[in-house]
Image: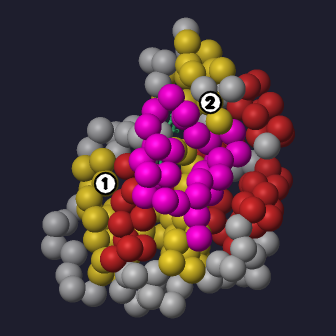
Amino acid sequence: MKKLIDKIQKEATVIDNRVIKVDHFINHMLDTKLLNEIGKEFAETFSDVTKILTIETSGIAFSVATAFHLNNVPVVFAKKQKSLVTGKTNYSTKVHSFTKNTESIVTVSKNFISEDDKILIIDDFLAYGNAATGLIDLVEQANATLVGLGIVIEKAFQDGRKRIEKKGYKVHTLARIKKIKNNKLFF
Ligand code: 5GP
């Protein structure tokens, strides 16, 4: 998506050749015009979706923007729990956080996804694929159908896409970063 790539190229900063900071339009403050265009692009790519699944917090806005262009389907966001006690009413999985280097238990209520659902997963970044494969695990536990994954920024030099495609799922990303060298991004 040219507009997104141009903005990342001009405005993103990089920490230690590995973490891309886009706080002022993706992770802390949101560029709502761009957000709407991102939602439209995902909605044009995926069809026959009954629910969107994401993980709190940064995936929520992109999921809602997409839902507005997909007949206002519901958005479900998986919650990061501190407690290991997740209860029988939730699907749960363990996810390693790339940015925080911590493990969390991620849960979704069994009331909110079911085997009749056709799920689109949306997230802000794809790096090693831990968040994405955790969400895939939740969809599979519910025996729901996974339509595909829509990711705003893919760091293609990490292994996320490979892990998802190995499971047989479609990934659509809007900005693909091939490498980072001297804290500079290459698309
Ligand atoms: P993964 O689970 O694929 O390794 O990493 C994806 C998750 O980590 C995303 O949900 C995102 O929040 C975070 N993340 C990974 N890489 C970056 C990055 O370079 N910048 C930012 N802001 N978040 C990242």
Query: Which residue is depicted at the point 36% across and 86% down?
Result: 110
Q: Position of residue 69 (x, y in %)?
A: 79, 72
What is the count of numbered marks? 2
Q: Nearer the viewer, residue 121 or 12?
A: 121
Relative placement, left or right, of 184 versus 2 is left
Label 2: which secondary element: strand
Camera-nearest label, 1 or 2: 2
Query: Which residue is depicted at the point 52% across and 60% down?
Result: 169
Q: Determine crowd level at label 1: few under 14, some 14-19, many 20+ residues with C-alpha closer than 10 A.
A: some
Residue identifier under label 2: 177
- Magenta region, residue range: 147-175
Q: Position of residue 133 (x, y in %)?
A: 40, 56
| Three-letter amino acid code of the residue under disc 2 | Ile
Q: In this picture, is 184 found above or below 2?
A: above
Relative placement, left or right, of 147 versus 81 is right
Relative placement, left or right, of 184 versus 159 is right
Residue identifier under label 1: 95
Query: Which residue is depicted at the point 40% across and 82% down?
Result: 143
| C-alpha gap between disc 1 and disc 2 | 23 Å
Task: Kindly tell me whether mark 1's CB lies below 8 Å from ligand 1.
Answer: yes
Where residue 89 sits, quadrant-wise, is: bottom left
Label 1: which secondary element: strand
Q: Position of residue 132 (x, y in %)?
A: 45, 55
Q: Between disc 1 and disc 2, whose residue precedes?
A: 1
Q: Nearer the viewer, residue 38 or 170?
A: 170
Q: Nearer the viewer, residue 165 or 144?
A: 165
